[in-house]
Amino acid sequence: MVQVLRTASALLAAASLVSAQWGSTPSQEPESQWDSSPTQQPQSQWGSSPTQQPQTPQPSNQQPQQPPRGGNSAYAPQQPTQCSAETRRTRREFREYTPESRDQFIQALVCLRRQPSRLATNVGSPSAYDDFVYVHWQAQNQAHNTAVFPPWHSVFLHVFEIALAGCGWNEPLPYWDWSFDSQSPEDSEIWSPRWFGGNGNGRCITTGFLANQQARFPQPHCINRNWRIEASASAPDGDAMIGAQYSQVEMLYLTDVRSFDELRHALEDHPHNNVHAAVGGDLADPRTSTNDPVFFLHHNNIERWWRNWQKEKPDLAHDYSGNRIPGRRNNDATPNDIMTFYGLFPDTPVWQAFDTEGGLNGAWCFNYSLSITPAGSAAPGGSQMARRSIASFKASQATQQQPQYSQPQQPEYSQPQQQPEYSPYGDPKNPNTPSPYDRTDKYNIRAHPRIPDQMLKNMNYDQEDVTRIRKEEDHLYDFIDYLNAIEGFISDCALINKESGYKPCDQETYEKQQLLRKTIVKGAKAILGAFKEVVRYGIQTFLQQIGERYYQGQGQAQTGYRQEYQQPGYEAPQQPAYQQPQPSYEQPSYQQPSHQQPSYQQPSYQQPTYQQPTYQQPTYQAPSNQYSAPQYAPEYEAPEYTTPTPEYAPEYSAPTPTPGYTAPNPVRPSYH
């Protein structure tokens, strides 16, 4: 695991930052139909009736101990229940239900569209389903870009679940785990004509039970979706595509925060808004988004991530903070604030939505499933699968044998000219991040389309919010580059893994996947910095600065990582242990080291010692103390000197010893 992260940090220098190619400007997706032309959104139509005017809720200082029971609301709170393992209801991913159960859910949605409205007659709602569209429209300024975004929608989903029960759906509300479909969302099973229908012809849905269905609010129109038309090799005239969404590991990276306010921003600003904008049409505007029933499955998934965060951080489960009014920076939200539901449900204090077991005055007793996972991916999360060719992967899946991880002498992907069926993106060694609309890369995680400015405007973001979101998008692109640079890692949602189908995720697989994802997130944050705290100046510059600091003074190139950092299994060099240098008489001077040098006392001499006389130096000189003390024999004996008789100096005579001269007896130095 550590080896993978080390390799990731090294290969990140090679990962291309695609944001400069496709992410430098906001996505040019069509604007909301209500803003495309003045004739399609006359403000007079909205303001003609006070009941249709979106209202801004006023903060309340009331502190009721429980929500009102019944009253004039369309749906009364459920009675308290004793929550236990037997009574707990599990909200599951839509595909975890049997096809027959999914049919029943669709029939319940059709039933709601035929039931009469429960709101006041002056609202003008034509059906029980349209009641939810109207209330969500009225709550635009209360429940979006404010702290109450998660708890308000949580209660809203609960009321919708009650309404579905009146139409024969007695199961918990399903959710759509778009992280599983994130690399090609348009291929998700939910868009089947049997379920929710697809993009349709032009802007109106033409397949499924929503085909040519009319919506009432905010003005009559046909329910529509607006995917992006993107040309491809198989469809030169263009395919209807949904830009890539957030994978599981990206969601974990986003939600790894330590306050409710950070979590709310992370969920609402990015995956919530991105899915709304990418599907487009009614879903791209909070005034109309509830017209598309995919809204409820999408928001149920957003709530799932809030509940998972509470479960992971139980000490923060009741944390609540942020702004009450959109566009304000003051932290004035409190758990006692009242959530308004405009006659659909009794007004409720925020704190009643904190607990899924015992919340809402004891009526709640639910949790979430572990979602779905690829049926044939290598555990955990495909991480143990070496990045190999598509052919070898399919062969191993066909034979159901243990994949062989030995490196072939000639990898298939090293000769793309001999395998024309592989595109450059099909190379499992390719670390480049593909665009949101690429569908040829089967291994890497795609970047996301930028949220259109119009979508952010619809969500009540001001310019300061937009600037912050753009910086965060840039930082998320860097994280995706980091993921794609990790050698050997293949996400669960990679297209190569989805070829095997899906199955409900069991506890053991989930724990292995989470362990891997958390390890990756921890390593990424150590390199990229904590989310919302990084001022982006480019990964290449970041790595270059690290290289300059690490190799300073070692004579290495100062333009990045060395070649050995690109080899798997390379261990970072350790600081060599200091070794005591041996004295050498060839060194003109010895510099005493300042660390790890054993201390000793400078030896003192009673008499100067003599060096062996040389022909160039007939006289003796006292040695200098610039080198370390010489090693002495156990017992020292004075050498016997003979008078040299060089041929070139016949007149030289040996010096006469001084009377009484004795051999010097040097004192040995004592080392400590």
Image (cartoon, rainbow, N blue to C red):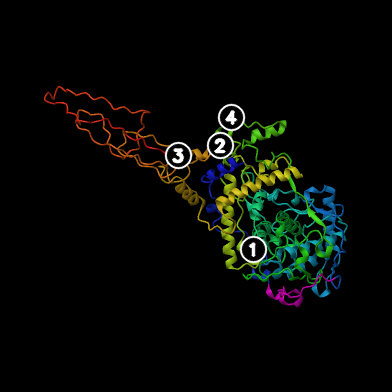
User: Left or right: where does residue 5 sit relative to residue 361?
Assistant: left
Q: Which of the marked residues, 3 or 2, is nearer the chain's N terminus? A: 2
Query: What type is the residue that disc 4 sits on?
Result: Pro
Note whether 508 is above or below 260 in the view shown: above
Q: Is residue 505 visible?
A: no
The residue tagged 2 is 569
Q: How many marks?
A: 4
The residue tagged 4 is 408
Query: What type is the residue that disc 2 sits on?
Result: Gly
Q: Tell me the crowding category of disc 1: few under 14, some 14 to 19, or many 20 or more residues within 10 angstroms, Cα based.
A: many
Quarter where residue 228 is shown: bottom right
Residue 145 location in percent, x, y? 66, 66
Q: Is residue 459 visible?
A: yes
Extent of the magenta region: 42-68
The label on residue 578 is 3
Q: Which of the marked residues, 2 or 4, is nearer the chain's N terminus? A: 4
The label on residue 455 is 1
Query: What type is the residue that disc 1 sits on?
Result: Met
Query: From the image, which quarter does the C terminus lie in?
Result: top left
Q: Which of the marked residues, 1 or 3, is nearer the chain's N terminus? A: 1
Residue 574 location in percent, x, y? 50, 40
